[in-house]
Every structure is written in C-alpha cells, then in structure tokens.
Image (tube, helix red, strand yellow):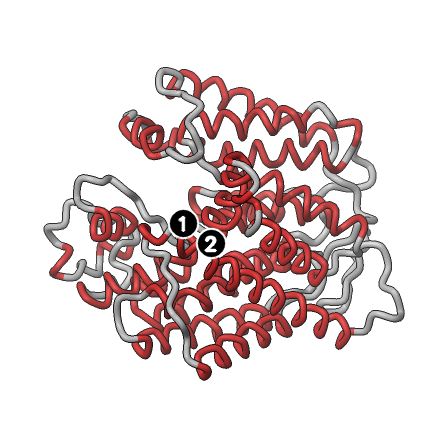
Amino acid sequence: MQTYYRAPRDMGSLSGESGNWTRVTLRIASVVALLAYSFFFFTVYRNYISHEWAYTGLVYAPLSGLEIFAITLGIALQAWAMPQKINSPSSVIIWMLTCLIYVPTMIITLMIGDRPSSDYYPSLVAFTVAMLLISAATGRCYTSNATPIPPKIFFNAFLIMFGLITILLFIQYGSIMSLASVEDVYFQRFSAADIESLSIVGYLRTHYLYVFASLLFAAGLLNKSYWYMMPLGLFGYFVTYLIDASKIAFIIPILMLAFVTICRFAQGRAWVLSSGLAGVTLVSGFLPQISPTAKIIADLILCRAIAIPAQTFAQYSDVFAARGYTWWSHVRGISAVVPPPTSFVADPFWPTLGQIVGSTYYGMESRVNLNANLFTGEGVAAAGWIGILVVGTAFGYYLRLLDHVVKGWNRTFVVLVSVPMGMSLANTHLTTFLLSFGGLFWLAIFHYYKPTLKQK
C-alpha cells in the first residue's frame, strides 16, 4: 500500500522545517511582508500609476484615517490567516489572489469608484470575510516531494496533445497571427475575436495556454532530462501572444520561475514570496524613468498584473448597482431559470458582463471586454456583497476538494501547475475557470491518475 505524507496545517515543509521558525513567527513575517508590499503598491500607485494611467480611471484620491486603518487591518488579518507555506494548490492560488486581487482592490476601490465611499464598505468587508474564510477552510498539505513526478509517458502524452493543438491553432488563426506591440494589443484581440470557430476550438485555445504549454514549461523546471519541453512551453506562450496578444502569456512563466525558486531555496515560505513581490513593486516604480523598454516592463507588472484586475471591482460595483444585479442569470444553466434584469434584456452584449462594463466606460463601439475575477464577475455583479460571500463559499469548497485530490502527487509539480490556475482566476469568473481554464481538467487528472514509484 502506498503511504502518503500529510503535514500539519500550514506547516508542511518542502525541504524540512527549521526549529527556529515557529508557526507564529511565520505569520508575523507574513504580516510584515504583505504590509510592506501594500505600502509600496500604494506609493507607486499614487506617484506613478495614477498619473500615467489616469485616463483609464486609475486616479488617486486621499483616504480618511479610518479608511486607512480599516484597509490595513483587513490586509494584516488576511496575511495572518493565509497559508504560510507554498505546498498545495490552495496555498498557491490564495497567495496569488491575495497579492494580485485582494490587496490592490482594498487600496484603490475607494479612490476610483463613482459613488460615495460608504457605498463600497459592505462589499469590501464581505471580500475580506470571504478571503479569511477561504484561508481558514483550506491550506492542508497532502503532498510530498518524496512522491515522484509523473513518468515520461505522462509528459509525452501532453506533448503530443500540445503538438496537435498547435497545428489546429495555426490552421484556425494563422492568417491573423501578428507580433503586436504590448502597448497596443486591442487590434490583435479584435482580429482573433472576429475569427469564427467552433466552441471546442475556444476551449482548446484557453487550455493550450493554461494547461498544455504551462505543463511542458513545468516539466523542464522539474527535471533536467525534460529540458527540451521548456522551450516548447515557451513557444506555446509565444503562439498564444501571436493570436490574441495576451500579456498573461508573459507573466505565467515568470511566476512559475518565482514559485519553483521559493520551493527549492526558501522552503516554500510564503512571506519570502510576498517580500519578493514587494521588492519588485518598488523597483518597478522607478523603471519608467530608465527607458521606454523598462517602462513597458513596469506597466506589465504594475498595471496589467495588479492595478487593472483590481480596478474592475469598483467598475462592476458601479454598473450593476445602477442597472440591477444579475443574480447569476448570466451563467449558462442558471439562465434557464433566472431571467436577466430588465435593463439587460435588450442589451446587445448580454450575457457577456465584461463587454457590458466595457461599453459603459469606453462606448458601445469600443469592443473593450473588461473581464473580471470571480469575486467581481460572479460576486459583486451577481448580488453585491451577498454575491461575494456566496462565490467565496463555493470557491472555498473547490479549493478544499482540489487540495484533497492531489494526494499522491509530487508537491513541486502540484505547485507549478497551480500557478496558471491562480493567474486565470485573477481575470476569470469561477464557472468560466472550471470549464475553460483547466479548473475541472486538473481536478479530474489529479483524482483519476496517481504517479507511483514503479512508473518511469
């Protein structure tokens, strides 16, 4: 019978836990690191983002002393509650949602919203409660690096599927593939959207980036004998960018490198990762002064990865508070029994919430699709603060299940393939993530297939 390692909650170690690092010490370090990141982001937002990107609605406004205290308290509580070791799918995803969504949302929402600040208080409190509940309900480690990584046949199977999908994508989108400037991506995205294709092609296209290319890149990071898979994974990211100029294709491999580094050299301590992000944020604030190329890198990190996903919280709050909450009628299946709000019945963009919000801010002819994370798109838009608690509860159950089914898998492998999932959730609804971005796919793989020592 195969024996699985199960570490105590939040204290599983990737290479052995030093006796000097107690549970409380890790949590204190996490609070300090996350507050440092929050302060640096606030400073960079005030001094750079709000000036350079004010035309998009990312403006600066002073906060009251009470608001600053409440925001700081919420961030500190989340830093204390979140998993302190990067050793499970939930620990990866919660860290990413905390740093890329929760913290910047708490900081900028009251500055950029069109309504009185008090109108956003219930939703921000609900967001904090949801994150705390998710952190409390997850974080157990069922994996061990003593468990082997999947055998070569496993990676070869994905390699074959990757090759077939690559051919399909070139057939479908080859005529519009272009290396678009990272500063002007919308023309390329509109060109990709104008290509008519079967639904299955759309599913394969998202899985190509978030599952297949990312798994090949992870294989190269895990085992030197699979080195040739890493450039193939990078090629997949490049193909994705040629199709729709998705900047996430650049961010995912960088984050995977960061996570594997923390796992190997910092025993998976989350506070080290948070400290690194704090440093990157601070340095990025100075990059625009160096050169145009450095400015592009800064905007990719500060705006695309952090500020813009957080901005949608206020935007969706304003639009759906005014026009009516969807009560999840935009979700396929639920739409059969729950009708849309009256104001959306004749809306040409229904049920694509991102286009509805995009047309509100940029005009009906803009075609801008302001996609949002799960707490915004299926939380705020669906039912305000109540929706945030509902989707947070559902997401917490999903993460608990995901943590459980990875039992018997190599820990570092699980961590790496969870990174694209966390990145997708920063810009995708929960139902969309499950069906189109690998949420259900990995759940099935982890549950029905278990690597063993006998496999090679």
| Left or right for 326, reference 2 | left
Is disc 1 in contact with disc 2, using a CB cutoff of under 8 Å?
yes
Q: Secondary structure at mark 2?
A: helix
Count the numbered circles shown: 2
**Residue under numbered circle 2:** 48
228 or 406, which lies in front? 228
Q: Is residue 84 above or below residue 225?
A: below
| Left or right for 117, reference 209 | left
- The residue depicted at 31 percent of the width and 70 percent of the height is 384
Q: Residue lying furthest bottom in this view?
A: 66
Q: What label sits on residue 396 in the rendered view? A: none
Q: In the image, what residue type sits under mark 1?
A: Glu
Residue 252, percent across and down?
A: 57, 41
Q: Quadrant of residue 379?
A: bottom left
Q: Is residue 165 above or below residue 69?
A: above
- Whether residue 448 is visible: no
- The residue depicted at 37 percent of the width and 70 percent of the height is 110
Q: In the image, what residue type sits under mark 2?
A: Tyr
Q: CA distance from mark 1 to mark 2?
A: 6 Å
Residue 2, percent across and down?
A: 80, 51
Residue 375, percent across and down?
A: 41, 62
107 or 291, which lies in front? 291
| Left or right for 205, reference 258 | left
Q: What label sits on residue 52 in the rendered view? A: 1
Q: Quadrant of residue 20?
A: bottom right
- The residue depicted at 55 percent of the width and 41 percent of the height is 251
| Left or right for 255, reference 349 | right
Disc 1 packing (10 Å; few <14; some 14–19; many ≥20):
few
